[in-house]
Image (cartoon, rainbow, N blue to C red):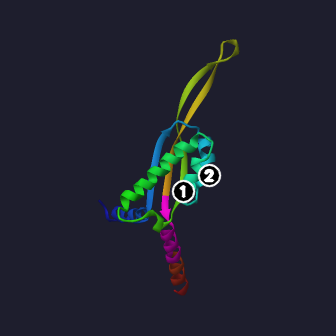
């Protein structure tokens, strides 16, 4: 492996070290409907996000809740001796990407057939602790001050 490639891999690992990711591929829900629910939890604390999803009437809320619970358990596996309450985890970002479409035909007048597209999506949730966000902001401010002094 080349030096440049190794260094970029190490930088990527450092960035991902404070984050926890959970994915759900080929979720059989329209991406548009899932994005409406995802907007509700983006940037919220995990307890608040779980309550929002639990009491939301929309169908994608239950699927999104499972992905969030998976992300929380991933964080616990990464940090076995730590308590979630001490870190103040928040939902840093939620990505809803469209996935494959199942194409079906519905009979239409005069012998034609209309296409029905049954859409699905990929859900990615990234959790991060408030402490690491504050530390990153402070480091960036310090770096900017050092650049201004030079």
Is 134 situated above or below 101? below
Asked which secondary structure carries label 2, the reply is: helix
Residue 87 painted magenta: no
In the displayed structure, 11 sits above or below 48; it is: below
Image side of residue 20 versus residue 60, left or right: left
Q: Position of residue 3 (x, y in %)?
A: 32, 65
| 29 relative position to 73: left or right | right
Instruction: Please tell me whether residue 68 is drawn above or below residue 58 in the rendered image.
Output: below
Q: Residue at x 46, y 48 (%)?
A: 23
Query: What residue sits 48% from the left and 48% below the top?
Result: 67
User: Residue 68's x, y, as percent?
Assistant: 49, 51
* Residue 8 lies in quadrant: bottom left
Magenta segment main secondary structure: helix
Q: Residue at x 51, y 83 (%)?
A: 146
Counting from the top left corner in percent of width and height, residue 126 is at: 49, 56
Q: CA distance from mark 2 to mark 1?
A: 10 Å
Residue projecting furthest to the left: 1
Q: Toward the viewer: 17 or 144?
A: 17
Residue 40: % across, % down: 62, 52
| Label 1 Cα neighbours within 10 Å, binned few <14 / some 14-19 / many ≥20 | some
- From this viewpoint, which residue is outermost toward the right? 109
Q: Earlier in the sequence, mark 2 or mark 1?
A: 2
Q: Which mark is residue 39?
A: 2
Residue 93's label in the rendered image is 1
For numbered disc 1, what is the local secondary structure?
strand
Q: Nearer the viewer, residue 149 or 23?
A: 23
Location of the N terminus (image quadrant): bottom left
Rendered residue at 57%/31% (across/down) = 118
The residue stretch that appears in magenta: 127-139
């Amino acid at each position: 492996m080349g030096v440049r490639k190794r260094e970029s891999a190490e930088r990527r690992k450092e960035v991902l070290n404070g984050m926890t990711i959970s994915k759900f591929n080929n979720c059989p829900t329209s991406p548009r409907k899932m994005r409406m629910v995802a907007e509700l939890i983006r940037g919220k604390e995990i307890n608040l996000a779980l309550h929002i999803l639990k009491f939301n009437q929309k169908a994608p809320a239950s699927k999104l809740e499972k992905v969030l619970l998976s992300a929380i358990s991933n964080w616990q596996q990464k940090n076995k001796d730590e308590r979630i309450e001490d870190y103040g985890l928040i939902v840093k970002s939620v990505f809803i990407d469209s996935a494959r479409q199942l194409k079906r035909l519905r009979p239409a007048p005069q012998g034609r057939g209309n296409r029905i597209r049954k859409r699905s999506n990929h859900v990615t949730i990234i959790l991060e602790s408030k402490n690491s966000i504050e530390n990153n902001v402070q480091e960036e401010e310090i770096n900017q001050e050092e650049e201004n002094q030079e």
